Amino acid sequence: MRTDSSPGNLPAREHLPAGSAGTPVLDVVIPVYNEEKDLQPCVMRLHEHLKRTFPYEFRITVADNASTDTTPQVAARLDAEIPEVRSFRLEQKGRGRALRTVWSASDAPILAYMDVDLSTDLNALLPLVAPLISGHSDLAIGSRLARSSRVVRGAKREFISRTYNLILRGSLQARFSDAQCGFKAIRRDVAQVLLPLVEDTGWFFDTEMLVLAERAGLRIHEVPVDWVDDPDSTVHIVKTATDDLKGVWRVGRALATGSLPLDRLARPFGDDPRDRELTDVPKGLARQLVGFCVVGALSTLFYLLLYSGFRTFSGSQVANALALLVSAVANTAANRRLTFGVRGRGGAVRHQAQGLVVFGIGLALTSGSLAALNAATTNPGHSTELAVLIAANLAATVLRFLLFRAWVFPDRRDEPASPVGAVIRNPASPTYSTSAPQQYQGPQQYEQFHTEQFHPDQFRAGEAADRTYGDATVQLQAVRPYDDDPNPRNAR
């Protein structure tokens, strides 16, 4: 699947209007589990801050996931006493499950969450959501690791946090600086498409969400925060770290195999309609050249190492053929995924077959060069052979890129847009009652609610992580390409 030629299932970002009275622009979710002591002071402080500083309508939603103390009663009392507060209860634990359930049901265009301990300075809340309201970004996160952040916490937690983020950078190539800070926001239109792809229902939920969003090319805004560690935190560090590492492995494997349909998150190139009127402009040439050069340099080193190894027990022609064959297969696979953005296993055999044809041309160039060298010199030195092979490979590399771009991985812009592209929406999302706190009555009520609207092109999010409980049912609807774009594949 060519992600760089998908029609783009998310519309261009736009500045959100102030909205009519009573319609919240921001919904701040506070996931809680057995927080009867801290819940009321947290909600009161957050509510006072938003009333005083936030220029839009807002809502605070307490998401109680299976508390066994008096937390539900505290949440219900706050719901009854404060008009901007709602309570929501789930009968199963999991911070990710709570966030996905409440976010999927919310009607606010900006969705956020923060931890109940309010470790993050609330002055960062407006800078967090402002880029989402303005249409500049898709997601926003608070970062405790930014240079201008001010953080007070113990050495143990500091080490764990930095180590975890280094693991994400090394294994998943994450570029955001702080995955676990409990201070994040997302646009609802993005959440409706992104959340069904996130499997985790626990602490790894927001890390997985960020990695998928970044890989899909969505814009993530980072806000430096002032943060004070909560010494009474009930998070089990060892279990959380183990679950996070399992999540890193699962997501990394899914990204490597191309099994995630990240093309559903494609955005148009820009908000200006003139960006979609450009024709006959090569797409992605500079990026493809950079990727091809990087893959080519690594392939050349791999080839030379193989040649030197095979040369110890065979002649130069046999060593060259074997080294070029092995490196060609690796080169085609790397260029397929990294340079030309082809995901999944579809067409992999055909691409490798075409790559072998390109390999044959390279073999003819390099073998001919070796034959010419042997004809000119009876016993050429090993360094001379390597120099000749490098020159021949440079010529073959130029030809290889042209053949890859024009023949093996062509940019098929003249093909009609695929009808399977979809946006995900939830037209039957439940809304919060203004008269009483909303109570979740269990999976039977959930299944009954969504079965009424179910039809074959629906799917349930979260089943991979939890077979006994579906967190949200979403509906697929075919995308109509932009009317003013003669080529729907140029929308991105």
Image (tube, rainbow, N blue to C red):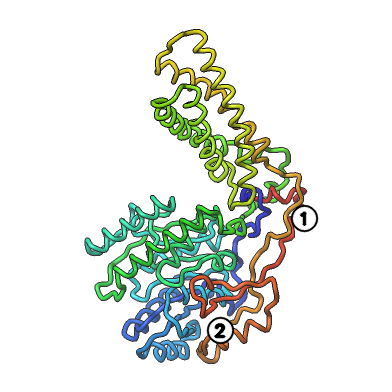
Looking at the picture, tell me which residue is in the foreground, 175 or 323: 323
How many numbered circles are shown? 2
Q: Quadrant of residue 483?
A: bottom right
Which residue is painted at 52% across and 25% down in the image? Answer: 393
Q: Disc 2 residue type?
A: Tyr
Secondary structure at badge 1 equals loop
Binning the other alpha carbons within 10 Å of mark 1 as few (below 14), some (14 to 19) or many (20 upward) gives few
Q: Counting residues from the N terminus, which is met first, the one under dot 2 or under dot 1?
A: 2
Lateral position of residue 280 relative to residue 22, left or right:
right
In the displayed image of the protein, which residue is found farthest to the front? 313
Secondary structure at badge 2 equals loop
Question: Can you give x and y, in whole percent of width and height, for residue 492 in the image?
Answer: 64, 50
Which residue is painted at 33% across and 52% down in the image? Answer: 147
Looking at the picture, tell me which residue is in the foreground, 160 or 462: 462
Question: Can you give x and y, in whole percent of width and height, for residue 63 in the image?
Answer: 45, 80
Q: Is residue 182 above or below residue 72?
A: above
Lateral position of residue 9 relative to residue 372, left or right:
right
In the displayed image of the protein, which residue is found farthest to the left? 155
Residue 483 - label: 1
Which residue is painted at 56% across and 60% down in the image? Answer: 134
Looking at the picture, tell me which residue is in the foreground, 174 or 181: 174
Question: Can you give x and y, in whole percent of width and height, for residue 370 in the image?
Answer: 51, 17
Q: Quadrant of residue 178?
A: bottom left
Which residue is painted at 52% across and 28% down in the image? Answer: 321
What residue would you read off at disc 2? 432
Q: CA distance from mark 2 to mark 1?
A: 36 Å
